[in-house]
Image (cartoon, coloured by chain):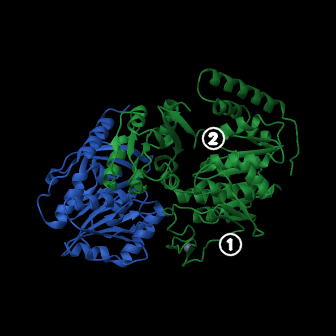
Amino acid sequence: MSDTSLRLVWVYPDLLSTYGDQGNALVVERRAQQRGLAVQREDIRSDQPIPTSGDIYLIGGGEDRPQRLAAERLVRDGGLNRAVDNGAIIFSVCAGYQILGREFVNDLGETSQGLGLLDVTSTRGEADRCVGDVLGDIDERLNLPQLTGFENHQGITHLGPTARPLARVRLGRGNGTGDGTEGAWNDTVFGTYMHGPVLARNPQIADLLVKLALDVNALPPTDDRWYEALREERITAATQPA
Amino acid sequence: MAGNTEPLSPRSRLAVTAGRAAAAVSRAAGRGSGSVIGGKVALRLDPDLLARVAQHLDVVLVSATNGKTTTTRLIAEALRANGGVVSNALGANMPAGITSALAGGAEEQYGVIEVDEKYLAGVARDVTPKAIALLNLSRDQLDRAGETRMLAERWREGLQGQKAVIIANADDPLVVWAASSSPNVVWVAAGQEWKDDAWSCPSCGGVMQRPDDDWFCAECGFRRPTPSWALSGDHVLDPHGSAWPISLQLPGRANKANAATSAAVAAAFGVAPQVALERMGSVTAVAGRYDVVQYAGRDIRLLLAKNPAGWLETFSLIDAPPAPVLLSVNARGADGTDTSWLWDVDYSRLAGHPICVIGDRKLDLAVRLEVAGVDFQVCNDADDAVRRCPPGRIEAIANYTAFQDLRRVVGN
Ligand SMILES: [Zn+2]
């Protein structure tokens, strides 16, 4: 963390901000401020260089062509990889998750190079788009409550040996590989197919990102009654479909 | 501009009759206006029916993400200066509903038709329109409608070589991309507050530059066309540079934009702007939207907002604080089941208003408002919410099925 404030970078909102992804930035910003931290949020468009000294980077989902363009520009820029070398925390969703991997299949049916920050490769599924509420158990090493989110994607993401699944789904499709895994992580880089936005549905993941960035084990408590009420409602709705 | 009139074939006449019968059954069974179910039966009997029922009409199609129902109504009012109009005024805007509505217009001169964005290309092919009004395109129901840019692409392909005059919003890059494949376009500077679906050039993918009200792509040269009509404050500027006052009873900037587009459409049919705009001034509410109803000693203004662009335009027209605001959001099939769009709406703009929250997804709203840092109360239902507000005006903003629920409760 820089001397005076938490530097939060939202990567390419012009290309990767389709499913309320701004919500993830708003939730991290709000929860850090509630802990008395000054937050410096930077929204970096795809014609601007990626700053390399940020603390937390957020990358959202997007449509197929913007995803390809974003990957091309991020590979050319190289700033995200340098930021990770500098110790930054990265949290990515859907199209952004695929971009952080080694490669993915783009809108032209070709293979696009990813950033290689997560040991995953993505292809496109033949099945219908997977749309709906998801419920999962997060990797126990992260010590977090159940994952709740909304998925809307057609991707299939295979995890390599150095990526751990972020969660195991009880309901929903997640990585689409049929093995019940959802998302991936490797200490400082996280990826998920969950929208919702996912950090509004899972504020403790937002807190985890802040803790990792600050290198602390705990944060002061916040009044989370509305988050808790929403989580309870969504988890119930996912397990008892109307 | 009247089309040639040819009697319906026996099969078409049978289809219309069967469709009417089904609509009557649907109405009797209490399933709404009956126009959609009637149209479905009719289309099954004769797939060419839509073309046939439209054959004698001068047809105007209206499509957009937001404002199409209102604009359809405004254009219909304006064209009545010249002759009879048939319209799908109840908002049944897919082929079946359109067929059903037009089947009742055998004696009319004009057909003014709202078309769902996804069906525009097909309907434009079937009904041989004289004019097509395109207002805006933005994210809406992402779980169902798919990609906004792909929708613009489908419009573009469907409108290629279209003989109708296209009246299109020069301030929405996606609409311009869609319309500019057509040879005959009248550009209207109608404005567009929401910009977050057009930062990427629809032509080449470059980053769009948007200084002030202008926009262009520095990479491929795709840029805002020079408009011949414009909305300028409370006036419509026509191609001769004359300014005509807008005196709508409908509130908000977006409706002034709809009036500007409607005036340009009316002019294409020979109705002068002054006449058209005067007639538009008689419209008070559209399918319950903008209606002010009295309930429990309060005056509740009913505002429909279905997507981020719609909420943004709605926030700019409500009364200033301390006017209380009632928000209601559902996520049923017709609304889209994904609520993540709430995070694309800047709810911090409601700071200072007392806010009451209801609807199936009031807890999603509660978290959204908590993160926006504004005060709010989560209420049991509409009645509870209204009674927590002081007597006077309440601005009630709801998405699609939440709006219908609210109308039922407050008796509109
Ligand atoms: Zn371009």
Residue B78 lies, in percent from the top left, at: 76, 49
Task: Give the secondary structure at mark 2.
Answer: loop
Horizontal and vertical percent position of residue A125: 41, 52
Q: Quadrant of residue A135?
A: top left
- Chain drawn green in the picture: B
Residue drawn 24% across and 50% down? A167
Q: CA distance from mark 2 to mark 1?
A: 32 Å
Ligand 1 located in image quadrant = bottom right
Identify the residue at horizontal 49%, vertical 42% (top origin).
Answer: B393
- Which residue, given by chain and number where applicable, does mark 2 sit on? B91
Ligand 1: does it lie within 8 Å of the C-beta at label 1?
Answer: no
Q: Which mark is residue B281?
A: none
Is label 1 in a helix, a strand or a loop? Answer: loop
Q: Quadrant of the C terminus of chain B?
A: top right
Picture disc at residue B226: 1
| Residue drawn where x is 53% and y is 41% of the image | B302
From the viewer's perspective, is residue A65 above or below residue A181? below
Answer whether residue B351 is visible to the viewer in this image.
yes
Residue A51: where, in percent of width, then height?
Answer: 31, 77
- Subunit that carries the residue with mark 2: B
Hey, which quadrant is residue B229 in on the image?
A: bottom right
State which tag comes first along the sequence, 2 or 1.
Answer: 2
Q: Position of residue B340 (x, y in %)?
A: 40, 50
Nearer-the-camera pick, B47 or B325? B325
Q: Would residue B208 be found to the left or right of residue A16 on screen?
A: right
Q: Which residue type does callout 1 highlight?
A: Thr
Report how many numbered discs are placed on residues in the image: 2
Q: Is mark 2 within 8 Å of ligand 1?
A: no
Colour of chain A, in one word, is blue
Q: Residues within 10 Å of mark 1 (few under 14, many from 20)?
A: few
Question: What kind of residue is marked 2?
Answer: Gly
Please tell me whether residue A52 is drawn above or below residue B37 in the rendered image.
below
